[in-house]
């Protein structure tokens, strides 16, 4: 039975994939993009329904932690109280309180975390020198230093600003394009593998 | 879609299909003669899992913000394959691995990964439903990073394999792992996340290397064929870019000559 279901999943994936790619690119004669649009809309609707699965997952995980008195379970209590309070306030029509909570708690905490990212990154660069002392690591540190120094509003470092602009437009842009092209190529190969049924992730 | 672009897309997909088919057949026929280049991160992953099992600590896998609906779908599936192969090795331990995501659409894939890993080892009864955890990411993913660092501390994870969609918040996660002496391998499809992974990850994975975990950890002919296809396409892309750059230097002479040759061929 499991094998039959796996074959069925493969057939559905291959057929839907080929129809979608054909319809999106050259437009199949009987649909001219309409069938692909329906498939894409179905995918979006399915993904939207999964938010319920997410909420259920959140409840199961944190109720389990509280029940098992796991390490850090008081945070789970706070999380559940906050979640129910937000839903309750929304049901009561008090979205103004929700907005205040979001602006004064959530945004403030996220901003402080964002400020910490810089320190974590500088410490990471320092660790890089300790762990992998190579020419690439040295170049990375040098580039980080140039970027940080040229971010300062000083007129004395005008020449360095030109270096920064050159770095951003030539090597950084080339490297970024190289990484993105690599990801694009791998995406095509993986997509083709799914289309021909070589990928097993959806059929076992 | 514009006609030229549509036919170009079809041509690229067909070329990839042809190369993949040939590469897979070659990989099947000459399985032992194909040697994959060394990627230290994939060599380190089983080692980190072994260390975690020995110290009786769980392994943490994370997709970040990857979702199966959209352009990142192939990467999600490729990482799912990698995580499945790694999670299967963790089922020998007493601790269920932790799998986290900030995208609710990836939750079913996460459950499937761990269920399949335990089923493969005949230990499905050991699977715990709370092992897969969703943390909403908020506007800037920092809430997700904060939740992840807390989960890593509470579960005392031994190794963290973070492959997927991460931005600059990855610095907080990797910093927390370092401070607690936890191993971490990270890679991201976002450039800022990838830069941070380069500086702070214990081992390095860049760009398309994220897609080939199946070949390095599983080694089926189809998976090895995918690596050969990817390398072949990469060489073709380099040749095309080189040709276009040379053409630019020669002010379009090469492309004009090629068009003339095609016209002669077409006319003949």
Image: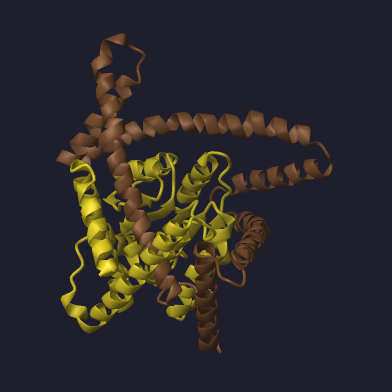
Chain colours: A brown, B yellow
Is A11 left or right of B191, judged from the image as shown? right
Q: Position of residue A197 (x, y in %)?
A: 44, 77
Q: From this viewpoint, which residue is outermost toward the right?
A: A92
Kindly indicate the quadrant of the structure image that contains residue B32: bottom left
Point out the image quarter for the C terminus of chain B.
bottom left
- Residue A26 visible somewhere in the drawing: yes
Kindly give the residue lying farthest to the front in the view shown: B267
Which percent across, then down, holds residue B117? 45, 73
Give the tally of numbered discs: 0
Residue B235 in sight here: no
x, y percent for residue B248 = 23, 43
Does A108 sit left or right of B215 as displayed?
A: right
**Which residue is at the far top?**
A155
Q: With respect to residue A90, does A68 lie above or below? A: below
Residue drawn 24% across and 45% down?
B252
Front residue of this view, candidates B87 and A2:
A2
Left or right of B107, for residue B9? left
Q: Nearer the viewer, residue A36 or A201?
A: A36
**Point 29% across, 72% down: residue:** B19
Q: Residue at x 33, y 52 (%)?
A: A181
Viewer-closest of A115 and B152: A115
* Up-down relation of residue B175 to residue B210 (above or below): above
Residue B228 vertical position relative to residue B205 in the rendered view, above or below: below
Q: In the picture, residue B230 is in which quadrant?
A: bottom left
Picture quadrant where residue B50 is located: bottom left
Q: Position of residue A191 (x, y in %)?
A: 42, 66
Q: Is residue B151 left or right of residue B237?
A: right
């Amino acid at each position: 039975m499991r094998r039959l279901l796996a074959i069925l999943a493969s057939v559905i994936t291959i057929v839907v994939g080929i129809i979608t790619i054909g319809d999106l690119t050259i437009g199949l004669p009987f649909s001219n993009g309409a069938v692909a649009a329906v498939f894409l809309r179905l995918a979006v609707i399915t993904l939207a329904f999964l938010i319920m699965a997410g909420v259920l997952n959140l409840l199961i995980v944190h109720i389990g932690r509280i029940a098992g008195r796991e390490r850090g379970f008081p945070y789970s209590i706070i999380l559940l109280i906050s979640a129910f309070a937000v839903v309750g306030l929304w049901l009561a029509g008090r979205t103004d309180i929700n907005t205040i909570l979001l602006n004064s708690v959530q945004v403030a905490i996220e901003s402080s975390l964002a400020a910490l990212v810089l320190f974590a990154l500088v410490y990471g660069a320092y660790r890089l020198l300790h762990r992998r002392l190579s020419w690439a690591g040295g170049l990375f540190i040098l580039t980080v230093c140039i970027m940080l120094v040229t971010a300062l509003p000083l007129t004395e470092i005008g020449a360095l600003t030109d270096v920064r602009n050159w770095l951003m437009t030539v090597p950084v842009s080339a490297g970024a394009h190289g990484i993105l092209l690599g990801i694009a190529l791998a995406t095509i190969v993986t997509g083709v593998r799914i289309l021909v049924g070589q990928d097993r992730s959806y059929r076992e | 879609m514009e006609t030229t672009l549509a036919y170009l897309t079809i041509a690229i997909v067909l070329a990839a299909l042809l190369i993949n088919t040939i590469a897979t057949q070659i990989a099947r026929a000459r399985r032992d003669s194909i040697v994959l280049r060394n990627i230290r991160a994939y060599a380190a992953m089983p080692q980190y899992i072994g260390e975690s099992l020995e110290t009786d600590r769980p392994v943490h896998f994370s997709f970040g913000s990857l979702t199966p609906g959209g352009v990142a779908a192939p990467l999600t599936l490729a990482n799912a394959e990698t995580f499945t192969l790694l999670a299967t090795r963790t089922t020998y331990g007493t601790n269920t691995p932790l799998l986290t995501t900030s995208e609710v659409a990836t939750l079913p894939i996460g459950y499937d990964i761990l269920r399949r890993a335990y089923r493969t080892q005949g230990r499905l009864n050991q699977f715990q439903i709370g092992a897969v955890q969703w943390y909403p990411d908020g506007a800037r993913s920092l809430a997700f990073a904060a939740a992840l660092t807390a989960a890593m501390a509470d579960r005392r994870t031994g190794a963290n394999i973070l492959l997927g969609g991460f931005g600059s918040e990855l610095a907080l996660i990797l910093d927390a792992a370092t401070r607690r002496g936890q191993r971490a391998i990270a890679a991201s499809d976002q450039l800022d996340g990838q830069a941070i992974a380069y500086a702070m990850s214990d081992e390095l994975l860049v760009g398309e290397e994220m897609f080939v975990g199946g070949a390095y950890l599983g080694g089926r002919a189809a998976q090895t064929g995918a690596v050969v296809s990817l390398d072949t396409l990469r060489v073709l892309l380099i040749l095309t870019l080189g040709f276009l750059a040379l053409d630019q230097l020669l002010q379009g002479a090469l492309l004009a000559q090629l068009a003339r040759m095609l016209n002669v061929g077409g006319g003949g």
